[in-house]
Amino acid sequence: MLKEMLILFILCNSILAQNSQIVFEERRTGIFMFYPAASLFFSQRLYYIILKISIVHLFIFAFFSCQKKTSPPYTRQDNYKEVLHGVEIIDPYRWLEDQNSAETREWIRVQNKYTHDLLSDHPSRAAIISRLRQLMNVDQTGSVIIRGDRYFLWKNNADEELWNLYYREGIEGTDKLLLDPHTLSEDHSFSYSIQDISSDGKLLLYGIRKGGEDEIEVRIMDVDSKNDLPDRLPRALYSAFSFKKDKSGFFYGTQERDIGPRTYFHRFGTDPDSDIYLFGKGISSDKWVSAFVSDDDKYLIVVVYHGWARSDIYIKNINKDSPFIPVVKDKDATFFPSYAAGCLFLHTNWKAPNGRIVSIDPENISVENWQEIVPEKEDAIQNVSFVAGHLYVHYLYNVSSRVLIYTTEGAQFGELPLPGPGSIRGPWGNWEGKDVIFEFKSYIQPRILFQYNQITDESNEWVKSDVDFNPDLFQVRQIWYTSKDGTEIPMFLVSQKDLELNSDNPTLLYGYGGFNLSLTPHFSSMAALWIEQGGIYAVANIRGGGEFGEKWHRAGMLENKQNVFDDFISAGEWLIDNNYTSSSKLAIIGYSNGGLLVGSCLTQRPDLYQAVLCLFPDLDMLGYYRFENNNPPALGEYGDASNPEHFKFLVEYSPYQNVKSGTYYPAVLLATGDADTRVPPLQARKMTARLQSATISDRPVLLMYDTKAGHSGGKPQSKQIEDLSMELAFLFWQLKMEYQE
């Protein structure tokens, strides 16, 4: 069509030029002839008619060319049929579950190209990348582990892609490099992890992770010489490691999807194939097991986790030929053990939904002999740290950290001084030592490491990240809104101080809602950029998390999962009803189980959102139980579609099965990676195809697919910045934002 229009346009110009030349010659010589003038008159009219037609056709052609450019790639349907509990399920994209087929690999390549063609050159992306580099490329110190007089620290320098492991002698010592992951791979997709450190700081048991896999290789380093011992374990999914104090070997667990969890002991200098089996036979793969040896080298303590709502505990005297004895078993509650001062301590929600702490004589473990040392309070316990001869009990008060300090007898010693509302990690330290280190951060405060002095009751800054961000320009508010069933839900709102309630503020709403995980205040470079650009960053503390104890958690799991989605939908409605934003300016974001959250909300309320970031998500809840690289214990949280009772509620909300053709869906950007061995990436692939086919809106459905990333990272700093800039470019595009310098 374009070729024909151009030819007609050129021909018209040629005719008009010839006739114009005739008239000019006649007028110059004084001879006037009617025909050429009449010819010119009709030629001019013909010219303008054709010109108008050409312009219209050119615009139409350009429009449809743009439409073609933004139309998603074609995905064939195979419409695989299966019957679950008498219900026929048709899966149009079952073939995309085969990650390694040539057809799937080509589909991934084409989808990635489509996404990058639309987002890479967004007008604001270069400025976004520049600002993210300023926020993220800074010297940082992460978590600290203290063993004896040695401090082990993760550090990421401003000019480095990855976190390195250092150690120092004493708190004021000079840092010495132990592990540098930059040498592992050219693309910096490999990383290290600490699995355990001997009590004297002489041996380091560490993992090597490829990309974002959960699986690791295991090696042991002599810290003094910085040389590895000959002993090593092959790549596998491990659950826990614990050195014997005499350093003769270590205990460890494996999480094998086909046979279930197992616990072994490896003696140094022996073949791992001959490692001694200790525990696990008969325990199914939907459980996981963690084990540690007591600091006096007397007991091996094993925890069997039945999902995130129940656990059993066993103990064995490893200096005697004695069996494992159940400390607690078959109780519908969680138990988290620690060992200090010759006692076994349990943080449990048994008969206390918000948590309490009991102490047990390991030689006299019957329940009637348990001693409650920290009773249940109104605030929920998050965790307990045993440091410097005291129990540091971490509570959440309205979703901000509060840490009370107790003696082993249960007397309150004090309260950890914090700089304000926010959240902590730690405290870290030795039971026998004096130093107490913890990390503090908030939505507008990057991480700071503090050193606490128990004698003076003072917290002093130890290490502060030098992030180019001014918290004085911003505000954090916490509001409470009413969910569908009348439950009051808290939500944090982070914005500039001069925010106007004009219903036109770009708003990014974040949530999780599951696995007893609490969303506490944290500093995010993405959120910092967002609020700098005039946006609102909202975090809804919905049910399913652990913010308000086990009742809050269970109100958002299994048959109660719909509460999670209702809470999140209500958060968006509140923001609109109270003039913070409008549906055309509202975006939602979720990772992992949070990806399930936003996937469910976009299928249940597609009208409520302009854009959705659905990252490393669970989405096909009817197929989850059969996927090879799933996380079997998660079935205790989600439900198992092979169970007819669970199928009833899963089929009602499973996002993939609830995509409806002919629906005006919001813009959606999904992200996943080949190396995700916890949340199968096939779910994001299939959801992308189904949404692209089903939607009748003009908003794009995109997939950002990384062949090396997974649930456990696998991204160097530059890759993180690249991906974040793509996500932000997507949001800027869909919410009609322009980057302001």
Image (cartoon, grey):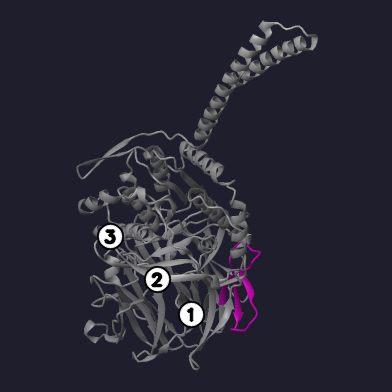
Coordinates of residue 282 in the picture (x, y in percent): 28, 62
Task: Residue under label 2, please give it.
Answer: 478
Secondary structure under tag 3 reads: helix
- Which residue: 64% across, 75% down? 176
Q: Which mark is residue 563?
A: 3
| Viewer-nearest residue: 258 or 176 | 176
- Identified by mark 2, the residue type is Gln
How much space separates mark 2 and mark 3, taking CA atoms?
21 Å
Q: Position of residue 402 (x, y in %)?
A: 40, 80
Q: Is 651 within the magenta?
A: no
The mark closer to the camera, 2 or 3, is 2
Asked if residue 310 can be seen in this view, the reply is no
Part of the protein shown in magenta: 152-178
Does residue 171 show up magenta in the picture?
yes
Residue receiving disc 1: 428
Label 2 environment density (alpha carbons within 10 Å; few <14, some 14–19, many ≥20): some
For this orientation, the residue located farthest to the right is 29
Quadrant (top left, top right, bottom left, bottom right) of the N terminus: top right
Q: Is residue 125 above or below residue 245?
A: above
Q: Position of residue 620 (x, y in %)?
A: 34, 48
Local SS, label 1: strand
Name which residue type carries label 1: Trp
Q: Is residue 500 above or below residue 341?
A: above
Residue type pointed to by label 3: Asn
Q: Tell me which residue sits at (60%, 20%) in the image.
A: 48
Q: For this rendering, which residue is in front, 345 or 513? A: 513
